[in-house]
Image: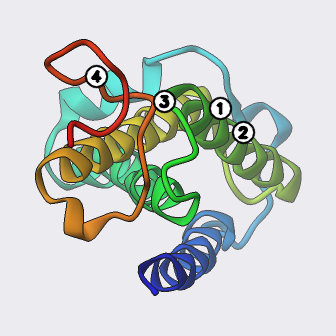
Amino acid sequence: MRSAVSALLLTAYGGLLGWLTLSPHSVAPLSWENRLQLHPLRTTAEFLAVGGWPMLVNVVGNLGAFMPLGLLWPVVRRGRTSVWRVGCLSAALSLLIETIQYGSGRRIADVDDLLLNTLGGLLGYGLYLVLYRYVPILVVPSSHPDLVTSEGETGSSE
């Protein structure tokens, strides 16, 4: 039952993520030069320097946008995933979104978004691992490969 609810939440999250990231922000098409930003951490540094609402929307928003993926994906998969898989899934989904944004001509494809989204997915997975260990009623896996017990064995500590 929890897995079905998680799958429903993951689907709703996917729809919301698509709407937020793929709806046009600009009425007029952007020039080719202004649609692609490939300098790592340039945009993030600019937003951190500005601070306030723009920083919150860009930096915290990009991290937070992918945290639900990292949290819900392992629940839907009943724990049959790993940090590597969640990182690759987050990066691949973010790359797909950035590619569509670039092709649309009305959004900017930014390498910082890819980096922050991937990190957000990994942070969500870290939250999943904490919940798995300390609040096991919230998650449904049988054993987990990314957790190491105090005895040095992987999987559940029970």
Please state which amino acid type lies under the numbered disc 3: Val
70 over 16 or under it: above or below: above
Q: Position of residue 1 (x, y in %)?
A: 46, 87
Q: Earlier in the sequence, mark 4 or mark 3?
A: 3
Q: Report the number of numbered marks.
A: 4
Q: Residue at x 16, y 39 (%)?
A: 51
Q: Residue at x 39, y 55 (%)?
A: 71
Q: Which residue is mark 3?
A: 83
Q: Quadrant of residue 35?
A: top right
Q: CA distance from mark 1 to mark 4?
A: 22 Å
From the image, state whether disc 4 or disc 3 is nearer to you.
Answer: 4
Query: In what element is the residue under mark 1?
Result: helix
Query: In what element is the residue under mark 2?
Result: helix
Callouts 1 and 2 close, C-beta under 8 Å = yes
From the image, state whether disc 1 or disc 4 is nearer to you.
Answer: 4
Q: Residue at x 55, y 85 (%)?
A: 8
Q: Which residue is mark 4?
A: 148
From the image, state whether disc 2 or disc 3 is nearer to you.
Answer: 3
Q: Which residue is mark 2?
A: 92
Please state which amino acid type lies under the numbered disc 1: Cys
- Residue 100 lies left or right of residue 49; in this view the side is right
From the image, state whether disc 2 or disc 4 is nearer to you.
Answer: 4
Q: Nearer the viewer, residue 149 or 38?
A: 149
- Residue 109 lies left or right of residue 143; in this view the side is right
Q: Which residue is mark 1?
A: 88
From the image, state whether disc 1 or disc 2 is nearer to you.
Answer: 1
Q: Quadrant of residue 16?
A: bottom right
Q: CA distance from mark 2 to mark 3?
A: 14 Å
